[in-house]
Amino acid sequence: MLRWRIAFLVSCAIVLSYLDRLTLPWTLSEIAKDYPFNDQTKALFDSAFLISYGLMYLGGGRLLDHLGTRRGFFVVMVFWSFACASQGFAGNFGLPAVFGMAFALVMLVISRFLLGMGEGGGFPAATRAVTEWFPVKERSTAMGIINAGTAVGAVAAPWLIWVVLNYTGWFGIAPWRWVFILSGALGLVWTVWWLADYRSPEEHRKLRPAERDYILAGHPAGGSGAVSKAIPFSELLAHREVWAVVIAKFLTDAAWYFYMFWLPKFLMETFDLKFSAASGVGWIPYAASGVGCLVGGGLSSWLLHRGFSVNASRKIALGVSAAFMPWVMLVPQLDSLAWVVVIFSLAFFGQQSWSTLVMILPTDMIPRQSVGTVAGMVGFGGALGGIVLGQIAGYLRDHDYSYTPILIIAGSLHVAAFFLICVVIPRIRQIEFRTSSQPFS
């Protein structure tokens, strides 16, 4: 069925998104040989990405609502691919340090900022694609498939980076620079596939009439690809349900970005591992996160098909996901690398199961012409959470604190977010907006 091929196409973009954002965390040890830096600088790299990622997630959602999915996704992919490649050209160029930081490191901060700016439009575009191509009962499964791309990209990153570090160095360019250049080139290749294969259901010539009718059942007149007037921010923010999802994402993505950006460093430092050994086990939690994407979305869809309401199916799956997260608090008590990897795998599984479901909530509550906007607001909240916990982590590490307080905080955030959603959103339902002239899809 064509709609599932579209889900795979979008998932491949998410694969590249996570590959690109993890190029720096996995090459830090190589970069440090040329340009030494401390943990606060490492946190600055992450914050530069997350600041622009969050802002563009917000603005990118609005942009996608105005440009449409096809044009919008093309623009953001081209931008972030060039931004990723630009990290490979960071250097001092004979210029002095800036605020005590080598000019090459300043260039990396700028490149990470630009990368975040581009990638901030990725998930709003994915959410719009799901809304266009899938009925309500299939959306969480489709989003699970798409979100599983985060795991594929994260699992592939250490292995691909290891290959590039060991088998490039062409034209006298350092291997770590090729990591960024080649990763960015893959994104440009994807845009060719995207332009060739993506259309809205009304416009896609390869879509069979029966499947088109199934997809468009209940869609408003004018079609899922139509660009409609978006609901004003002020009216969206007047509803506590929107705030609840944004704050929940703020809490839970704080933990996720800490795990994602700091796990390679944590494994290397805690167990005195070299890159090859850390990458040999570091991919396992990311693989577990991919399973979580599929299980979380699949569980919610299964419950819907069994006759559960949208409210019950989403909240049951969210509660199950949150239950996996507090186990990470045990990590500081463990001396076994194997058990640490197991515990992190549980956390990654639960996180991405949770994330899949949270990103579906806007499609359950918001009219389609503003789904991208609300998805952007949710992502912006998540990026802010990542900045806050990342900066706390960098400060604590540079002041000789262990990882224990950070892991205690991270392990408690999903449970708090789950209770927030249950209290503030007693029933997940379609919200009535004064300026919405289109029915929900």
Image: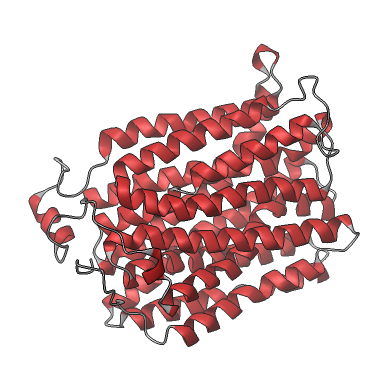
In the rendered structure, the answer to whether residue 210 lies left or right of residue 358 reads: left
- Which of these two is toward me, 161 or 212? 212
50 relative to 305, above or below: above
- Which of these two is toward me, 415 or 86? 86
- Return the x and y of residue 276 as percentages of the image width and height: 73, 40
In the rendered structure, the answer to whether residue 402 lies left or right of residue 353 reads: right
Q: Residue at x 64, y 32 (%)?
A: 87
Task: Give the image quarter of residue 387.
Answer: bottom right
Coloring basis for residues: secondary structure
Q: Residue furthest left?
A: 209
- Return the x and y of residue 75 as percentages of the image width and height: 40, 37
One can see residue 27 in this view:
yes
Q: Residue at x 51, y 48 (%)?
A: 152
- Return the x and y of residue 279 as percentages of the image width and height: 69, 44
Q: Residue furthest right?
A: 400
Q: Residue furthest top?
A: 171
- Return the x and y of residue 216 as percentages of the image width and height: 15, 59
- Which of these two is toward me, 123 or 2? 123
In the rendered structure, the answer to whether residue 125 lies left or right of residue 265 reads: left
Quadrant location, the C terminus = bottom left
1 relative to 198, above or below: below
- Which of these two is toward me, 39 or 151? 39
Q: Residue at x 38, y 53 (%)?
A: 62
